[in-house]
Image: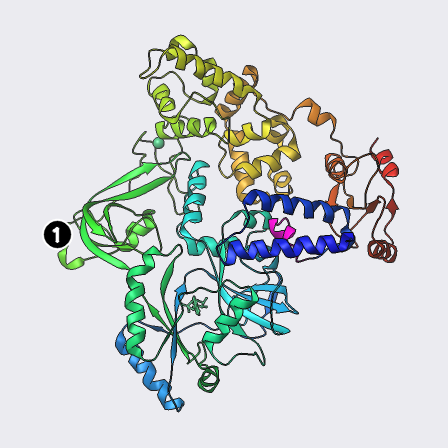
Amino acid sequence: MNIEQKINQLRDELRQHNYNYYVLDSPTITDYEFDILLKELQELEANHPEFHDANSPTLRVGGEITKNFQTIVHEHRMYSLDNSYSKEDLLDWETRIKKLVDGDIQYICELKYDGASISLTYENGSLLRAVTRGDGFQGDDVTANVKTIKSVPLKLKGDYPPKFDIRGEIVLPWEGFNKMNEERVEIGEEPYRNPRNTASGSLKLQDSAEVAKRPLLCLLYNLAGNKLPVETQLSSLEKAREWGFRVPTEAKLSNSIEEVLDYINYWDVHRHDLPYETDGVVIKVNNLHYQEELGYTAKAPRWAMAYKFKAEQVSTKLNSISYQVGRTGAITPVANLEPVELAGTTVKRASLHNADQIEKLDIRVGDQVYVEKGGEIIPKIIAVDLNKRPANSEPTKYITQCPECETGLVRKEGEAQHYCPNYNGCQPQIIGRIQHFISRKAMDIEGLGGETVALLVNEGLIHNYSDLYELTKEQVIPLERMAEKSADNLIKGINLSKQIPFERVLYALGIRYVGETVAKKLVKHYKSIDVLALATEDDLVNVDEIGEKIAESVLEFFSSEQNRIIIERLRNFGVQLEISAEKLANQTEKLKGSTFVVSGVFETISRNELKKLIEDNGGKVASSISSKTSYIVAGENMGPSKRAKATTLNIPIISEQEFLKMIS
Ligand code: AMP
Ligand code: ZN
């Protein structure tokens, strides 16, 4: 077998395993075995760029950056759906249909998946494009991001038509959603409200590698195209499944509106057992010829109807409103309710989100309120029962002072949340910030937990994270649940954290919006905290992926005298505030402004080492040749098509030795 055949064989094999895992939900090999095959393919592809394939399974990990999403006109318009809420609505719909078509009508019931709608275009069995619904006429090209979703087949199987669109929904199953939220809370961000918004937000991320990390799922339910080889909606679902799409199995044929209602009633209860969210049922006329006869209104097909489930609701009394202060100082109002049963759990609290929400609902202590558990994990209050409002009721006055430290609250222009600005003196902020500092992804201090941090602060032993490094064993031993041994471990853990590299230290500082990835980007660019502290807003926004919001937050952090003192203290204790000398020694700006494409096999270094050298010296590595390429570093076996392209575009091809000379 030659290299090309081997590559193709691996691609086919990996595709089948992806399909088994993500579409059929029944893998036949272990994750480990999968990774080995994937690595083998990655290596071959890296050494043989001439066999590049835009739909290779290795591209699932993403990496492509989209700054501006291109607008694409849908070849077949993406309609919305009419809504119904009762049996009468459905019977009315049936009457309207029966006036327009002759014959027996069968319906197909599907679940209405709550996510972001997507249209995928396939040509000759390959994914060509993925476009959001937009306004129905045109949407955004989000192909690079959608390619990272493993349940979207990049290549089809079987007797697919040469060209067609398939529509579906990109959803974020509960399990993955909850996990993402745990991580959000860790970096001091507000948790995402619901899976639907998070799914559609994910499609518009600029870095597809970020999208690849999100456990999104693509469920498909409609074909669109000319002369498709199907006669009914049911058979088109079956066909799509054969071609490799993840088509939900809940769809069911019904012969009457009565049967449709059985389906609705069944799923109204059982939807809570599904791994993802659904907010209703979509009923479609099964026969596609009838569908054609029925056609469309200005906004929706006449042959389909959505039925919305009623969100579960109860009424209960609002006993009080309390206010929580987060690590970043954000204030969240919380409704304390008379405990009540809702969708299988006892609800005692509901989020009120912010001052605007309270004002909008005109919600007051003592009110009887309606609580709903909809798409959100935390129940919310949707309305007040004004008939039951006590006569002496007074409008809610939002707090103006921090409930913990009594500092006057501030609210920045354009932000919904109030903040306590007492950054250095507000207990929950201090504790939260130190807890973040010691957390696993930050300084990872073993032997010290969140509760001990709270104790240390409450006892007045520490006031900020730099104080940790001055703690002594003698100070710690008298604390609750501490003993000689645990005190030793704690001090040891703190000392060890002095070796944590700068990028994690920067993350640990807890600057708002500076998560792990941003910290890495900043460190790569600025290399030391002193240089970063001097950066202006213009400087900062010029760094890859750093926007205004992050830039302002960084500036604010360093403009604080207190923060500068804390950083000085960290420096004196030996915490890493710049990239290590070794790393730095290998970095130059010699290749700044140049973009390289690496091709072929090299004698003295591996391809990965070569790429690292380019980046360490300030150059950029691209995967394909374009007019923006400055040089091609060619080893042995550079592909003929690449060579031809380089010649046409007049791009210099240099050898390994010539490259090494450039940076020596
Ligand atoms: P709406 O956004 O309320 O007008 O509802 C229409 C949207 O429902 C469509 O654009 C689809 O994105 C979505 N949808 C979810 N599940 C289905 C399904 N099984 N069939 C058709 N549309 C669906
Ligand atoms: Zn405060």
Indicate whether residue 332 is drawn in magenta. no
User: In the rendered image, which residue does mark 1 sit on?
Assistant: 390
Amino acid residing under circle 1: Pro
Residue 462 horizontal/vertical position (percent)? 40, 18
**Toward the viewer: 422 or 567?**
567
Residue 434 horizontal/vertical position (percent)? 43, 26
Screen quadrant of the C terminus: top right
In the image, the segment drawn in magenta is 54-66
Ligand 1, seen in the image, is in the quarter at bottom left
Position of residue 577 relative to residue 622, above or below, is: above
In this picture the colour scheme is rainbow
The answer to whether residue 625 shows anywhere in this view is no
Residue 203 horizontal/vertical position (percent)? 53, 56
Q: Is residue 103 left or right of residue 542?
A: left
Residue 23 horizontal/vertical position (percent)? 51, 58
**Toward the viewer: 254 or 261?**
254
